[in-house]
Amino acid sequence: PESIHFSFQPFAIKLNQYLSEALEVPIEKCKIKLMRLSEWFVGTGTPNDSYARLKVEFMTGRDRQKLRLAGEELLKRFSEAIQSQNPGQPCRITVDFHEIDREL
């Protein structure tokens, strides 16, 4: 939303570096698509009802423990990045992991 400010590119570069190391994949395999939605609503849709979501997709076969730890770390890093750029602005933050089946 326009009420939340976030620098996508620096965060994306750090995210790729972290995922490459944490999941032991070449950084060239890490791809990020950044999108800012112009219309969405949380609760009554007031400016204080901000929401940020980080969706991570990966191919099946990754170590579950590494994914769980990476998810916790991504939530921490995403929360810190949003809050540091928007002090005093409440924002609901989520991180979702989704598997892509290699055989489909």
Image (tube, rainbow, N blue to C red):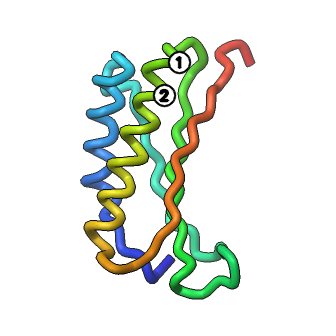
Q: Secondary structure at mark 2?
A: helix
Query: Are dots 1 and 2 in contact, CB under 8 Å?
Result: yes
Residue 99: quadrant of the picture: top right
The residue located at (29%, 33%) in the rendering is 18
Q: Which residue is mark 2?
A: 68
Query: What's the residue type where badge 2 is placed?
Result: Arg
| Along the line of sight, the residue nearer the viewer: 82 or 36 | 82
Which residue is at the far bottom?
46
| Along the line of sight, the residue nearer the viewer: 66 or 35 | 66
> How dense is the environment of label 2, judged by Cα within 10 Å: few (below 14), some, or many (20 and up)?
few
| Along the line of sight, the residue nearer the viewer: 101 or 91 | 91
Query: What's the residue type where badge 1 is placed?
Result: Arg
The residue located at (53%, 86%) in the rendering is 47
**Left or right of 8, for residue 38:** right
The image position of residue 53, as x and y in percent, is: 53, 56
> How dense is the environment of label 1, judged by Cα within 10 Å: few (below 14), some, or many (20 and up)?
few
Which residue is at the far right?
104
Quadrant (top left/top right/bottom left/bottom right) for the C terminus: top right
**What's the CA distance linking mark 1 and mark 2?**
6 Å
Residue 28: quadrant of the picture: top left
Q: Secondary structure at mark 1?
A: helix
The residue located at (54%, 67%) in the rendering is 51
Q: Is residue 92 above or below residue 32?
A: below
**Left or right of 102, for residue 55:** left
The residue located at (43%, 43%) in the rendering is 32
The image position of residue 54, as x and y in percent, is: 50, 50
Q: Is residue 103 above or below residue 2?
A: above
Question: Which numbered disc covers residue 64?
Answer: 1
Question: Which numbered disc covers residue 22?
Answer: none
